[in-house]
Image (tube, rainbow, N blue to C red):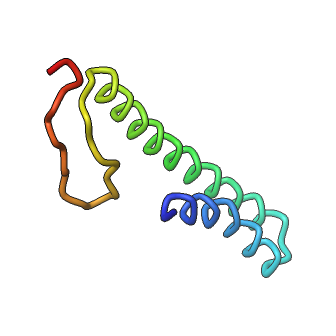
């Protein structure tokens, strides 16, 4: 849920600022910065998704982690 809120905020803030500032150059700058932040968020989410897929492919059982939380891996493989 938190990741979805970060994603929505990353998409909405340039729109909100461009509605407040009626300058075409500022609007382009806001959207440029917003696009860069969207790329960073996408790379982070993709990295986490790939890590989880590798763990699942090894047969490891685990809980999805929230950022900053302590890992709670059970360490039991499906082959045991």
Q: Is residue 72 above or below residue 5?
A: above
Q: Is residue 25 left or right of residue 48?
A: right
Q: Quadrant of the C terminus?
A: top left
Which residue corresponds to the image point at 32% horizontal and 58% vertical from the top-left? 67
Which residue corresponds to the image point at 26% horizontal and 21% vertical from the top-left? 58
Q: Is residue 64 left or right of residue 3?
A: left
Which residue corresponds to the image point at 30% horizontal and 47% vertical from the top-left? 63
- Residue 34 pos. (x, y %): 63, 57
Q: In which image quadrant can residue 9 be found?
A: bottom right
- Residue 21 pos. (x, y %): 79, 78
Q: In which image quadrant can residue 54 be found?
A: top left
Q: Is residue 5 left or right of residue 20?
A: left
Q: Is residue 44 above or below residue 1?
A: above
Total numbered badges shown on the rendered structure: 0
Which residue corresponds to the image point at 33% horizontal and 33% vertical from the top-left? 51
Q: In which image quadrant can residue 4 be found?
A: bottom right
> Closer to the camera, 75 or 33?
75
């Amino acid at each position: 849920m938190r990741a979805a809120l970060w994603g929505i905020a990353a998409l909405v803030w340039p729109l909100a600022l461009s509605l407040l500032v009626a300058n075409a150059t500022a609007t382009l700058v806001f959207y440029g910065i917003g696009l860069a932040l969207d790329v960073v968020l996408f790379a982070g989410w993709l990295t986490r998704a790939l890590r989880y897929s590798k763990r699942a492919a090894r047969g490891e059982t685990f809980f999805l982690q929230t950022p900053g939380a302590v890992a709670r891996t059970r360490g039991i493989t499906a082959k045991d």
